[in-house]
Amino acid sequence: MCRRMAVSGNHLPTTIALNFRVLETRLKTSTKFKSSNSETYNNPFSLDELRDAISKSHDSAVGPDDIHYQMLKHLPPNAVNTMLETLNNIWFAGNFPPSWHTSTVIPIPKSAKDASDPNNYRPTALTSCLCKVMERMINNGLVWFLERNKLVTPLQCGFRKQRSTTDHLVRLVSFIREAFI
């Protein structure tokens, strides 16, 4: 039997909200995360990781530091080594440059909309390309660690290589067809 609950506005009924808070508290306290910081994703970045991150970068507009990907792609080897050393220092010290905390926001008008209405614009934030290269290296290391140690459920398809959310749609259609048979 299905019971419908009338919900006014965006507020959940009090009993649901309380039950959710109890469950949320229980889940938070049961999580036990231990780290010695010796995991491979905490190792210094390698030259190969840096080159890979730069090579996968697509030309885009520059951020507040005026450094673009073409500059990074054409650096001489000694400058790449200096950049790697700098990124590793930032990684271990945890002191990100102030320019990485800012972005240039450009409002782009939505197509076929009234340009005089501010609601018809979408903001695009332009951030530092160096910061994005470092983010890519961090992400690649974390994804590699999670995949290698099978810490991501096999049911997770979105945002994974050689998988797609379409996989779940195919699975659902398959289940529905089997149910009809």
Image (cartoon, grey):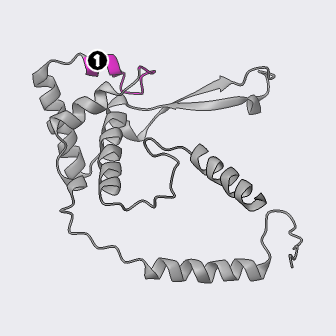
Q: How many marks?
A: 1
Please identify the residue farthest to the left as the structure is shown: 78
Residue 14, horizontal then vertical, whole percent:
77, 80
| Label 1: element kind | helix
27 over 71 or under it: above or below: below
177 over 103 or under it: above or below: below
Question: The residue under label 1 is which amino acid type?
Answer: Met
Please tell me which residue lies in front, 147 or 131: 147
Which SS type dominates the magenta stretch? Answer: loop
Tell whether 76 sits left or right of 152: left
Q: Residue 107 occupies which quadrant of the picture? A: top right
Residue 173, horizontal then vertical, whole percent:
69, 50
Q: Which residue is the site of mark 1?
A: 71
Please tell me which residue lies in front, 101 or 32: 32
Residue 176, horizontal then vertical, whole percent:
73, 56
Please tell me which residue lies in front, 97 or 158: 158
Q: Is residue 95 magenta?
A: no
Tell me the quarter of the image containing the C terminus.
bottom right
Tell whether 55 sits left or right of 87: right
- Which residue shows up at 69% across the image and 82% down it? 18
Tell whether 32 sits left or right of 104: left
Mark 1, residues whose alpha carbon is within 10 Å: few (<14), some, or many (≥20)? few
- Which residue shows up at 71% across the image and 77% down it? 17
Tell whether 80 sits left or right of 19: left
Residue 93, horizontal then vertical, whole percent:
21, 52
Tell me the quarter of the image containing the N terminus.
bottom right
Q: Is residue 72 magenta?
A: yes
Range drawn in magenta = 59-73
- Which residue shows up at 30% across the image and 60% down it? 149
